[in-house]
Amino acid sequence: MLRLRQFIDRAGWPRIIIGLVLLSLFVVAPSVGVRIDASLMDTIIRFGMNGVMVLAMIPMVQAGCGLNFGLPLGIIAGLLGATMSIELGLTGVAGFAGAIGMAIPLACLFGWGYGVLLNHVKGDEMMIATYVGFSSVSFMSIMWMVLPYHSPTMIWGYSGQGLRTTISVDGFWSKILDNFLAIRIGPNFMIPTGTILFFALMAWLMWAFFHTKTGTAMTAVGSNPDYARASGISVDRMRTTSVILSTVYGAIGILLYEQSYGFISLYNGPFFMALPAVAAVLIGGASVNKANITNVVIGTILFQGILTMTPSVINAAIHTDAAEVVRLIVSNGMIVYALTRATRKSR
Amino acid sequence: MTRKYGLKDGLSRFFINNAVPIIFIIFIAFAIPISGFSGPYLIQELFIRVGRDSFLVLSLLLPIMAGMGINFGMVLGAMSGQIAIILVLNWGVPGIGGLFLAMAVATPMAVLLGWFSGVVLNKAKGREMVTSMMLGFFISGIYQLIVLYFMGKLIPIHNPVLVLSRGYGIRNALSLLTMRLSLDNLIPLKIAGISIPVATYVMIGLLCLFIWWFGKTKLGHDMRAVGQDMGVSEDSGIKVERTRILAIILSTVLACYGQIVYLQNIGTLNTYNGADQTATFAAAALLIGGASVVSASIPNVFIGVVLFHLMFLVSPMAGKNLMGSAMIGEYFRVFVSYGVIALALALYAWKRLKERERARRSLRGGKES
C-alpha cells in the first residue's frame, strides 16, 4: 500500500490516468473492430516522427530556461533547409542529408539570437518564447511569399511566385528513413527501423552531451545558477548553448517528421507545433525544470498512443470524430497541470 | 541614488518608456498615405472599431493592477459569452432584449470560470501569463467539446438553423441578424455623415467610470498592494489569494460582456475560431497603447485600440499598393500583433532585470556605472 502511494506520488495523477486510459483503449479496441497491430504500428510511426522534437525540450529545461515554447523557430530552420534542398533538386539520401546540413547552421544562428534574447529576460522565458515562436511563424509567412524560390514543385502554379502551403516531398526524400531496414510483419504491421534508429542516435547524442563537461555545467546552471557562477561557469553562455542545441534538435526533428509524413507544411503549419512536444515531455514525467531521455521516450509513446487510439476507438464506438478536441484537452491540460505544479525556484 | 534628470535625459527616458506607441505612430503616418484611404472613411471605421473593441481591452486592466500581468485567460469569458449567445439564438429572443439576456445567462458561467482560473493562477505565482494562456487553450478544447458534440445531443437545440446537418453540433458561422447592431443603433446619431454608436460608447464610459471608482475602493487599494508585494500585503492582513481571484473573476466577466458587445457589432459568430484570437488582439492593442505588464491605464486602452485598428485597417491596402499583394499586408498585421507582444514583454523583462542588477550593485555600495 505504501509503495503504491509512493508510486502515485512520484508519477502524479495525470500520468497514471493517461496511462490507464491508453491501456483501456487498447483493451477495448478489438471489441469495436479496431485492429491492434495497425494501431500499434501507427503509434510507433508517430513516435518516430515526433520523438526528436520532444528531445529538443531537454537542453533548455536542464539549463533552467523552462519549456521551449519557441520551438517553431527551430522548425522554421528545418523548413528552410527542406525547401532549399528541394530547390537545389537534391533527391534521396543526398536530399535528406542536404536538408539537415543546411538546416543546422541556420538553427545555430536563430538559436543564438533567441538565446541571447532569453538571457536578457530571465524569469519570463516561457511567455516570451511563446511569442517569439508565434511572431517568427507569422514573419516567415511573409518570407515564404517573397523569397526567390523557383522550383516548380514548390511554388504556386498560377502566379509563379510564392511557396505553396503544403509541399509534397514525394520523389525527393519521402519516407527515406521509414523504409530503411523496415521490418514488415504481415500486411498490417511495419516497424520504421530507420526512423527509430535515427531517434536512438539523436537520443544517444543528447545523453552523451550531458555527460561531457559542458553538459554537466549546463545542468549545474539549471539547478543552481549562483553555485554554477561561483564555480566559474559562464551562466549566460551555458544558457545560450542550451537554446542553440534545442533549436537544432527542433530543426532536425521537423525534417524527420516530414520525411515520414510526406509533406512540408509552411505558413501556419508550425504555429502550434511546440505544444504537442511540450505536452509529451511533461506526460513522460518531466517538470518545468527537470527532464531526461526516459521522460521523452515514455511521454512520446503515451501521448502519441492516446492520439492514435482515441480517434479510432471513439470513431468506431460512437461514430464521432472527437480526435482533435481530445488532443487539445489532453495536451493543454497537461501543460496547465505542470505549470501549476512546478516548484518555484528562489529568485 | 536619486539625481536630477536633465532635459535631454528626461526626453530620452520619455522615448524609451513610450517606444512602442511612438514606433506605431511613425509606421501609421507612413502607411496611411500609401493605403490611399480617405479621412472620413478612416474616422467612420475607427468610431465603429473603438466601440467594438474597447470593452474587451478594458477587461485586461484589473489583473494588471493586481500584479498578475496580462490575463490571457480572458478568452474564458469570451467563450462563456459565445455559449450564451448560441443559447439565446436557440430561444429566439431578438434585439436588445436578447443581448441583455445573453449577458445575464453568461454571467454565472463567467464567474465560475473566472473563479477556476483564479484558483489555478494562484498555484502558478510568478508565471501567471503563460499559465493563463495555456488555460485559455485548454478551456478552448472543452468549449469545442461542448459546442461541437454536446449541443444538440445533451443540450437540446431546437433551432435547426444553428445545428450542423449531421444533427448535433453548432455550425461554423452563425448569423446574428436578429441582434446585429442592436446596441450600436439603440440611440442613432449621425454627425457630418459619420454615424456614432452612442449606446455602446455610453456603456464603455460607464465601465471606465467603474474601473476608476473601483481603484478608489478598499478592494482596489488591496489589489494594488497585492500587485506591489504579496508578502507585505499578506502581513498587513490582506487576503492575497482571495484578492487575486476576485481580480480574475471581474476580468473574466467583463471580457464576457465585451465579447457580446463585439459580436453584436460584427454580426456573425465564428463558432470555432473566434475566441482564441481575442486575447492576442486585446493584449496587443493594450501594449501598443504604451501599457506594460505591470502598469496600464484607461488612456493606454484608447490610444492602443485606435493605433492598433489604424494599423489593421491600412496595412492590407498598403501592402497591396507597395508590394502588389494584399496577403502580405494580411500576414504583416498578424506578425505585428504577435511581434508587439513579444517586444513589449521582452522590453519589460529586460528593464526589470536591469533594475534588479542596479539594486544589487547599490546594496554592495558600488557606484552606478
Image (cartoon, coloured by chain):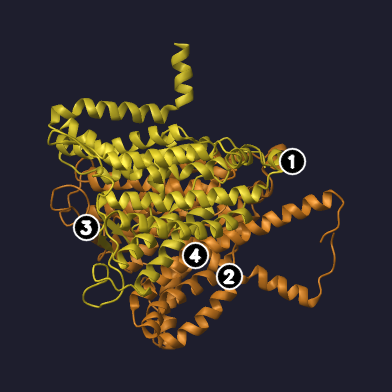
Chain colours: A yellow, B orange
Q: Which residue is mark 4?
A: B339
Against A268, residue A215 (above or below) is above
Alpha-carbon distance for marks 1 and 4? 36 Å
Q: Which residue is mark 1?
A: A230
Against A14, residue A232 (above or below) is below
Mark 3 or 4, closer to the camera: 3
- The amino acid type found where label 4 is placed reads Gly
Can residue B109 be seen in the rendering of this structure?
Answer: no
Residue at 26 percent across and 62 percent down: it is: A167
Chain of residue at mark 4: B
Q: For residue B176, what is the image quadrant? A: bottom left
Mark 1 or 3, closer to the camera: 3
Chain of residue at mark 3: A
- Pick the front one: B303 or A113: A113
- The amino acid type found where label 1 is placed reads Ala
- The amino acid type found where label 2 is placed reads Val
Dot 2, crowdedness within 10 Å: few (<14), some or many (≥20)? Answer: many
- The quarter in which the C terminus of chain A is drawn is top right
Alpha-carbon distance for marks 2 and 4? 11 Å
Q: Which residue is mark 2?
A: B20
Q: Which mark is residue B299?
A: none
Dot 3, crowdedness within 10 Å: few (<14), some or many (≥20)? Answer: few
Mark 2 or 4, closer to the camera: 4
Q: Which residue is mark 3?
A: A170
